[in-house]
Image: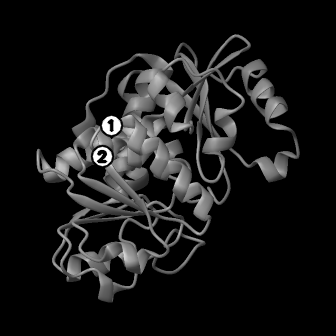
Amino acid sequence: MDGVPVLRLGLVGDNIAASQSPRLHRLAGRQNGRTVIYDRLIPKELGQSWDAILDHCAASGYRGVNITYPYKETVARHVTIGDPLVARIGAVNTVLFDGAARRGFNTDYSGFVAAYRKVRGAAPPGRVLMIGAGGVGRAVGFGLAALGAEEIRVADRDAGKADALCRDLAAAREGLNTVPVESAEAGAVGADGLINCTPVGMVGYGGIPLPAAHMPGAAWAFDAVYTPAETEFLLAARRAGLDVIPGYELFVWQGVDAWRLFTGLPLDVDRLRADLAAGDGGEA
């Protein structure tokens, strides 16, 4: 559009055809009089090394890119991380380009904390089962530590990843008890919170990470998946009477924080939510 500043962004990941990130950032741009070009970049289709992909983005005028499953930990090894907390998390979901420099950030961490507080206020997380120790799991785990969780139980198909995350979380906050568990079912016994940080339940990855029979007795549940908005995991948690924190809340807040990093421009979050809910009619 003539005379309107153009901002080029992108999303890097697999199985991203249904992602709403392009709409979120285009709508954020519209609030600020910016035209946003937001591309979907699938590494397997690009057939390049990570350094080549990131160098191409920097050279092609991208201001930044969001990183999604399953590349958040991988990309962290190819960017400069200035925040010691993000370095401890070891996963990056936002990359900002300054010339040839690539700077890594994690807005999953801040987005989860905001999502939790929006639904549960100041209520402490208590004893929490977290399924999945990958990139988003690491960010959410550190978020739980910041929120004052009493105990974090980590279940992952890769026992080594669960062990490593438990060690890192225990070192992050004195008095935090961390326990790697053999299965989600075992970890759910006596848990106050139930969290899914795996792609199970996402469009293209059907199923439920914890059978519904193991949910009663918990107080709250969170699913990092947001497509679909109502996963089988969340529906089962609602039926069991748990407070539910939808993955959509993480999606919105991590996007708001990423927009701030990309641009430094303000956002009316209520207007953004309304425009996202309006479907295609919310975009010019």
State whether residue 262 appears in this view.
yes
Mark 1: give few (<14), some (14-19) or many (20+) Cα within 10 Å: few
Mark number for residue 176? 2
Q: Tell me the amino acid under the disc marked 2.
A: Leu
Query: 153 or 216, which lies in front?
Result: 153
Gap in Å between the C-alphas at discs 2 and 1?
Answer: 6 Å
Instruction: Assess disc 2: are there few (<14), some (14-19) or many (≥20) residues with their C-alpha within 10 Å of its C-alpha.
Output: some
Q: Quadrant of the N terminus?
A: top right
Is 24 positioned to the left or the right of 273 in the image?
right
- Note whether 71 is above or below 87 in the view shown: below
Identify residue for label 1: 173
Left/right placement of residue 119 relative to residue 95 reads: left
* Tag 2 near tag 1, CB within 8 Å: yes
**Residue 127 higher or lower than 62, as above or below:** below
Q: What secondary structure is marked by label 2? A: loop
x then y, percent, for residue 114:
26, 41
Residue 37 screen position, x and y as percent: 60, 32
Q: Position of residue 102 (x, y in %)?
A: 66, 20
Residue at the image position 27 percent from the left and 80 percent from the top: 215
Instruction: Identify the residue at the far bottom of this view.
Output: 213
Q: How many numbered marks does the figure carry?
A: 2
**Residue 27, visible in the rendered structure:** no
* Occupied quadrant, residue 77: top right
Q: Position of residue 122 (x, y in %)?
A: 11, 44
Image position of 238 (left or right of 26)? left
Give the quarter of the figure containing the C terminus. top left
